[in-house]
Image (cartoon, coloured by chain):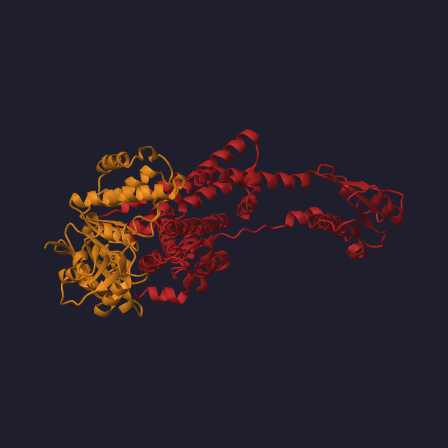
C-alpha cells in the first residue's frame, strides 16, 4: 500500500493550517517592510537634523566653497574673531563643530594644518567631505598659481570603460557582472535560509511525533521510510507555499508603499543594489538600460532556472533528511544542539566560500572543489553558474548531489527507524553508529 | 486447532543484546492470548515483530498460514503501550487519517467511525482538538482507531491503563464482543486479575526466552499443588491439629466462615485422592469447608519467573 500521498497531504495541511504558521506567513513580510521603513526613517532623522559648522578661515582661501546652503550641513563663516574666542562661542552655542584654517604663506603649508574642533568625534563622511572640498579648492588655486589652465585639464581628462569579452565572443559588462552576482547571491542565500527554516520544521515535527507517542501507532501501518519521506515532502511543500506567499505579499506591499506613499524602498536595501546603481550611474543612462536588457537576454536564463530548481530541491532534500535523522534520534529540541554542528558547518562554509571565493574567482580551484562536494555544491554551484560553468560540471555536480541524497536518506532512514522508538535518553554518536547496524 | 498466528524460532538482537532468544508461539484463532512477562522481558520486541515495525534476525512469523508481508498491516490492529495522538489535530480528522493508513477508504472510515463514536457515546468530540481531551478520552479514540478496520488480529498492550473502572469495564466488554465477532486478541498486561478474567491462553516470556505457554486451564492444572483449604469444627481443636500435623503437611489458612472452624491448608500426596482426604476429615469432625486451592495467574507468574 502506498500511503505517501496521504502522509504528504496530512503533513502539508497540518503545517499550513497551523495558526502560528499562518501568522508567520502574513506577518513576516509586514515585519520586514516595517523594519525597512524604520531603518530608513531612523537614517533620515539623522540626515535631516541640521548641523551647523562654524568656519574660521584666516587664510581666506576657502570662503567661497562654503556658500552652499542646500544640504543639511550649514556653514557659518566667522569673521574678525580669533580661534580661542571662536572655540568658546561654538561650544556655548552647541554647534556641531568648528573648522579652522590658519593663515599661511603658501597653499602647501595647509596640508597638515587645517583643524576641526568638536565635542564628539565627528562623522567620517563629514571629514572626508571637508577634506575633498578643501583639497579640490586648494588644488585649483595651486594650478592657477603655477599658471596652469584648469579648463584645459578638465578637457584633457579621459574616462575609460573596458569592454569585456570572452574567447567565445560573449560580451559582458560591469552591469551584467552585477546581475550575475545578484542572481548567485540571492539564490545561494535563499537556499541557505530555506534549509535552516524548513529543515528545523521537519525536525520539530518528528520530535512532536515522538513526544506525543503517536509514532508507534503510525509505523504499525506504514514503513518508517515512507513516513519520513512524507514528512520531508509535505513540509517542503508547505515551505514553498510560505515562500511564494512571502514573495507575493512583499511585492504587493512594496508596490503599494511606492505608489501610495512614494517611499523608495530600494534605497533602503542592500549593497548589491547600490553596486548595480553605481555601475548604471556611470555614463549614459539609456545606453546602459539598453545594454542591460541585452545582457539580461544573453544570460542563460533557462539553464539558470533549471539548475536553480535542481540544486534547490537536491540541496534541501539532502539536508532535510539529516534534520529528520536528528529529530528521530532525540527526545526534545534542547537535545538537538550537539547534532546540529555537523549540519551547520558545511552549510555556513558553503555560504562563506560562495560569498568570498566565488565572487573573487568563480572558476578558481577552491570554488570548483566546493561546487562538487554535495554538502556545499547547491549553494556554491548556484553562485558559480551565472558566471558560466561548463555543462559537464553542472551535470556531474547534480548527479553527485542526488546520489548523495539517496545515500543520506538511506542513512537517515536507518537512524530514523531505530530512533523513533527510543524514548527517554539522549543518544551519543556511538549509539547512533550502532543503530546503523541493527 | 486452527492457529491464526504462528511464530517459529524468533531471534532478535540489538547489537550484543538478545531481546528474543528462539521464541516460538502459536496463537489459536478466536482466543484471547495473554502475553505475559516482567518488564524488559521482550514482549514489546515480539509485538513489534508481529507488527512488522522491526524485522526478526531469524525465524518466521505466519499469519493465517502466510508469512508476514506489508499487506498484513490491514489485518492487524495494534494498541501500543506507548500511545498518543497528534495533539493539534482534530479528533475526527485524525481518526480518519489513521483509518486510511490502515487501508480503509474515506467513506468507509467515516461510516464506521460514526458507528463507533455513537456506540461509545463520544459523537460530539469529532471537532475537538486532541489537546482538549483528557487522557481517558484520548484512550477511547485510540481504542476505536485500533479496531476500526475490523482486523483479524488485535494486539492490546496494557489497554486498561489510564481508564477509570467504569471505562475499563466498557472496553473489556468491547474486547469480549470483538472476540465473539471472530477476532483473535493478543493481550499484554501486568494486571493479573484481567488475565484471569479474559485470557484463555497465555505465554510467559522472561529474560528473552519463552518459559511457559498453553491453555490457562492446562497451565493451572500443571501448577496445582494438591492443596485443599478445609474448615472442620470439632470439640477438641488441639487433638485435631495434632492428628493433621502428623499425617499431612499443613499450613494455616484464612477464609470466611460462619463456623468456629479449625482452618488449615492441607497438601496431600499426588497418589491419593481428594475423596480420601475428605473421608478422613469427616471422621474427625464436621467438615464445613473443602476447596481445592487453584493457583492464580499471579502465582504462576511469580513462581515461574523466580524459578527461571
Q: Nearer the viewer, residue B263 or A73?
A: B263
Say which quadrant the C terminus of chain A sits in: bottom left
Q: Residue at x 54, y 29 (%)?
A: A260
Residue B219 locus on image (x, y percent): 18, 60
In front: B19, or B300? Answer: B300
In the displayed structure, A42 sits above or below A59; it is above
Residue nearest the viewer, comparing B95 with A303:
B95
**Color of chain B here?**
orange
Q: In the image, residue A245 lies at what x, y percent? A: 43, 38
Q: Is residue A400 visible?
A: no
Outermost residue, top side: A260
Specify the quadrant of the image occupied by residue A428: bottom left
Left or right: residue A366 compared with residue B12: right
On the question of residue B172 being in view, the answer is: yes
In the rendering, at what x and y percent does residue B287 appear?
A: 20, 56
Image position of A291 (left or right of B273): right
Task: Provide the letter of the chain coloured red.
Answer: A
The location of residue B55, given as percent across then percent down, is: 24, 60
Q: Nearer the viewer, residue B207 or B296?
A: B296
* Residue B260 lies in quadrant: bottom left
Amino acid at each position: 500500500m502506498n500511503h505517501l500521498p496521504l502522509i504528504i497531504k496530512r503533513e502539508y495541511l497540518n503545517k499550513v493550517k497551523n495558526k502560528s504558521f499562518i501568522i508567520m506567513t502574513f506577518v513576516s513580510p509586514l515585519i520586514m517592510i516595517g523594519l525597512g521603513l524604520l531603518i530608513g526613517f531612523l537614517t533620515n532623522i539623522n540626515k535631516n537634523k541640521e548641523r551647523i559648522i562654524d568656519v574660521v578661515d584666516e587664510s581666506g582661501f576657502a570662503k567661497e566653497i562654503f556658500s552652499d546652503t542646500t544640504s543639511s550641513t550649514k556653514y557659518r563663516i566667522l569673521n574678525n574673531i580669533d580661534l580661542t574666542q571662536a572655540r568658546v562661542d561654538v561650544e556655548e552655542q552647541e554647534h556641531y563643530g568648528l573648522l579652522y584654517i590658519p593663515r599661511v604663506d603658501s597653499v602647501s603649508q595647509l596640508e597638515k594644518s587645517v583643524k576641526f574642533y568638536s565635542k564628539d568625534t565627528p562623522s567620517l563622511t563629514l571629514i572626508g567631505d571637508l577634506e575633498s572640498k578643501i583639497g579640490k579648492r586648494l588644488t585649483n588655486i595651486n594650478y592657477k598659481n603655477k599658471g596652469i589652465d584648469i579648463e584645459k585639464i578638465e578637457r584633457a581628462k579621459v574616462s575609460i570603460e573596458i569592454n569585456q569579452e570572452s574567447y567565445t565572443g560573449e560580451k559582458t559588462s560591469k552591469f551584467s557582472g552585477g546581475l550575475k552576482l545578484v542572481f548567485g547571491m540571492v539564490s545561494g542565500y535563499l537556499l541557505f535560509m530555506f534549509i535552516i527554516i524548513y529543515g528545523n520544521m521537519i525536525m520539530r515535527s518528528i520530535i512532536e511525533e515522538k513526544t506525543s507517542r503517536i509514532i508507534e501507532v503510525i509505523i504499525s501501518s506504514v514503513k518508517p521510510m515512507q513516513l519520513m519521506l512524507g514528512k520531508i515532502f509535505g513540509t517542503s511543500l508547505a515551505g514553498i507555499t510560505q515562500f511564494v506567499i512571502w514573495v507575493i505579499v512583499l511585492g504587493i506591499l512594496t508596490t503599494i508603499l511606492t505608489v501610495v506613499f512614494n517611499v523608495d524602498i530600494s534605497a533602503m536595501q542592500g549593497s548589491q543594489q547600490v553596486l548595480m546603481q553605481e555601475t548604471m550611474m556611470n555614463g549614459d543612462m539609456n545606453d546602459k538600460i539598453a545594454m542591460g536588457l541585452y545582457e539580461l537576454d544573453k544570460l542563460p536564463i533557462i539553464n539558470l532556472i533549471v539548475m536553480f530548481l535542481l540544486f534547490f530541491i537536491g540541496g534541501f532534500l539532502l539536508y532535510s533528511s539529516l534534520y529528520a535523522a536528528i529529530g528521530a534520534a532525540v527526545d526534545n529540541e534542547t537535545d538537538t544542539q550537539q547534532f546540529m554542528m555537523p549540519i551547520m558547518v558545511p552549510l555556513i562554509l558553503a555560504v562563506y566560500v560562495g560569498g568570498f571565493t566565488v565572487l573573487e574567482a568563480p572558476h578558481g580551484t577552491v570554488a570548483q572543489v566546493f561546487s562538487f562536494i554535495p554538502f556545499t555544491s547547491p549553494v556554491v554551484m548556484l553562485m558559480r553558474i551565472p558566471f558560466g560553468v561548463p555543462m559537464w560540471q553542472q551535470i556531474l555536480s547534480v548527479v553527485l548531489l542526488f546520489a548523495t541524497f539517496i545515500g543520506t536518506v538511506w542513512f537517515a532512514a536507518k537512524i530514523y527507524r531505530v530512533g523513533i522508538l527510543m524514548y527517554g535518553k539522549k543518544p551519543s554518536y556511538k549509539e547512533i553508529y550502532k543503530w546503523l547496524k541493527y | 486447532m486452527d492457529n491464526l498466528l504462528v511464530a517459529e524460532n524468533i531471534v532478535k538482537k540489538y547489537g550484543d543484546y538478545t531481546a528474543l532468544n528462539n521464541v516460538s508461539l502459536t496463537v489459536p484463532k478466536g482466543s484471547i492470548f495473554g502475553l505475559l512477562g516482567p518488564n524488559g522481558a521482550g514482549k514489546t520486541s515480539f509485538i513489534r515483530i508481529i507488527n512488522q515495525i522491526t524485522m526478526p534476525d531469524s525465524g518466521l512469523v505466519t499469519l493465517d498460514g502466510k508469512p508476514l508481508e506489508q499487506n498484513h498491516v490491514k489485518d492487524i490492529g495494534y494498541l501500543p503501550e506507548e500511545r498518543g495522538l497528534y495533539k493539534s489535530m482534530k479528533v475526527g480528522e485524525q481518526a480518519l487519517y489513521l483509518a486510511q493508513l490502515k487501508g480503509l477508504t474515506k467513506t468507509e472510515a467515516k461510516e464506521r467511525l460514526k458507528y463507533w463514536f455513537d456506540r461509545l457515546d463520544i459523537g460530539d468530540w469529532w471537532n475537538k482538538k486532541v489537546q482538549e481531551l483528557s487522557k481517558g478520552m484520548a484512550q477511547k479514540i485510540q481504542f476505536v482507531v485500533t479496531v476500526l478496520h475490523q482486523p483479524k488480529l488485535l494486539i492490546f498492550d496494557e489497554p486498561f491503563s489510564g481508564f477509570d473502572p467504569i471505562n475499563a469495564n466498557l472496553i473489556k466488554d468491547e474486547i469480549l464482543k470483538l472476540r465473539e465477532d471472530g477476532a483473535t486478541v493478543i493481550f499484554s498486561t501486568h494486571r493479573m486479575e484481567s488475565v484471569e478474567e479474559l485470557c484463555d491462553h497465555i505465554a510467559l516470556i522472561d529474560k528473552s526466552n519463552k518459559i511457559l505457554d498453553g491453555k490457562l486451564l492446562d497451565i493451572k492444572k500443571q501448577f496445582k499443588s494438591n492443596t485443599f483449604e478445609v474448615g472442620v469444627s470439632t470439640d477438641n481443636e488441639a487433638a485435631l491439629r495434632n492428628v493433621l500435623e502428623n499425617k499431612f503437611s499443613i499450613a494455616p489458612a484464612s477464609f470466611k466462615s460462619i463456623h468456629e472452624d479449625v482452618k488449615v491448608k492441607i497438601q496431600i500426596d499426588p497418589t491419593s485422592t481428594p475423596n480420601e482426604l475428605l473421608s478422613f476429615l469427616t471422621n474427625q469432625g464436621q467438615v464445613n469447608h473443602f476447596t481445592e486451592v487453584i493457583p492464580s495467574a499471579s502465582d504462576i507468574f511469580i513462581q515461574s519467573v523466580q524459578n527461571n
